[in-house]
Image: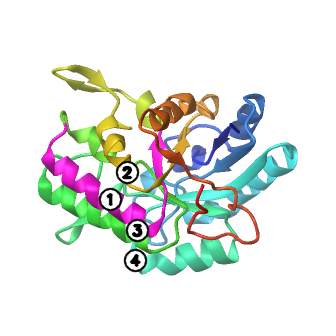
Amino acid sequence: MKITNYHSHTYRCKHAQGDALDYVRTAFQGGASVYGISDHSPIPDGRYADVRMALDELDSYEAAVRRAQADFPEIEVLLGMECEYFPEFHAFYEDELLGRRDYDYLIGAGHYTPIEGSWRNSFANMDHPKMLNAYSRHLIEIMETGLYAFIAHPDLFGCSNEFWNEDLTSCSRDILSAAEETRIPLEINGYGMRKEPVQTSNGPRPQYPWPPFWELASEYDIRVVCNSDAHRPQDALASLEETLQLAKQFDLKIADLSHLGSSSRQAVPLVA
């Protein structure tokens, strides 16, 4: 199987290290055939500026990826972006990033959840049914836009729950049903395996990926993407083996993303 990774960051997001060339160099040494740089997208109104690049860094970011493409022609290096979805900026994602700037793909992410007129951090407060319902509705909205090649870490709620329960099952089934209907792949994200584990009375476990979610996923006709979500150059290909093993454990089908970067780029993936 080819070694690929579609999720990585740069120093511009303010919580990662290194630049595109550093990640691609490590990926090349590790035998990767496709490597996507997908830093956190700026938001036109400047919100959440402490965890994403600034709007005026787009040009330097793109230049860094283009340099990596030129320096390592042996690898297919893709220009991507990990994006929140704020409906008022739909045109920015579609017309500016995918359109004028010709990005190869966007990743949809729900780091923030809209609820009761405000946006809340999705890494916390996911132990309440109302928050879980809002989170699943938001991910469904992201999928239905058709802008995104896949959805990042859909089981992010693992960060704030100790044990699986029926509320999590309901939330997960809503997300999985939408992924099946829209044909948008879901990501098994390796970064959660490298973070501080969740401490439970049964011992520590990774924040995500959370196996009960992916066991449920095996009941649906969906595709998955296994990624490192690298925030350091030395982690360019980290945790890929473990994420692929999880996919194998539950007999999950790997998405074919070979169309990304081609002139016939589409938001809806090809079926493997």
The secondary element bearing badge 3 is classed as helix
Q: Which mark is residue 242?
A: none
Residue 149, percent across and down?
55, 62
Q: Which residue is mark 2?
A: 154
Residue at mark 2 to residue at mark 3: CA–CA distance? 16 Å
At label 3, the amino acid type is Glu
Range of the magenta residues? Answer: 164-189
Crowd band around label 4 with a 10 angstrom C-alpha radius: few (<14), some (14–19), many (20+): few
Residue at mark 1 to residue at mark 3: CA–CA distance? 10 Å
Q: Residue at x 77, y 35 (%)?
A: 28
Of circles 4 and 1, the one toward us is 1
Of circles 4 and 3, the one toward us is 3
Q: Residue at x 55, y 42 (%)?
A: 227
130 relative to 50 in the view: left or right = left
Q: Is residue 110 visible?
A: yes
Q: Which mark is residue 175?
A: 1
Residue at mark 4 to residue at mark 1: CA–CA distance? 19 Å
Residue 250, percent across and down?
41, 37
Q: Earlier in the sequence, mark 2 or mark 4?
A: 4
Q: Which residue is mark 4?
A: 87
At label 2, the amino acid type is Pro
